[in-house]
Image: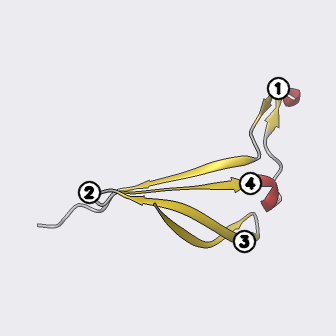
Amino acid sequence: MLGVEGELTLVGRQGPIRFDLAIGVDGSIGATAVVTQTRWGLKPYTTMFGALKVLDDVEVVLDGQPPPQSL
């Protein structure tokens, strides 16, 4: 597993982020990172007087396929 680091801008705040990257034999790419909402000044979503909540840590998942080859 490879790591890719960069800068993320979210709600006007910028900071470092690291994605764990996996590359498949077919050229597909998968990446995951955890975004802690409060670190970016976001309040985790809640509704129904707190009965429904989103955790502070949210996993971001990216999946990609290579473009089809031209003939």
Task: Determine whether label 2 and label 3 are within 8 Å by CB.
Answer: no
Q: Amino acid at mark 4?
A: Thr
- Label drawn at residue 15: 3
Task: Tell me how far mark 1 sits from mark 4, CA to CA.
Answer: 21 Å
Which quadrant of the figure contains the C terminus? bottom left
The residue singled out by tag 4 in the image is 36
Q: Is the residue 9 above or below the residue 64 in the image?
A: below
Q: Amino acid at mark 3?
A: Gly
The residue singled out by tag 2 in the image is 26
Q: Secondary structure at mark 1?
A: loop
- Sequence-wise, the earlier of marks 2 and 4 is 2
Q: Nearer the viewer, mark 1 or mark 3?
A: 3
In the image, residue 68 lies at what x, y percent?
23, 61
Task: Determine whether label 2 and label 4 are within 8 Å by CB.
Answer: no
The residue singled out by tag 1 in the image is 51
In the displayed structure image, the side of residue 49 where residue 16 appears, left or right: left
In the image, residue 32 lies at what x, y percent?
54, 54
Q: Amino acid at mark 2?
A: Asp
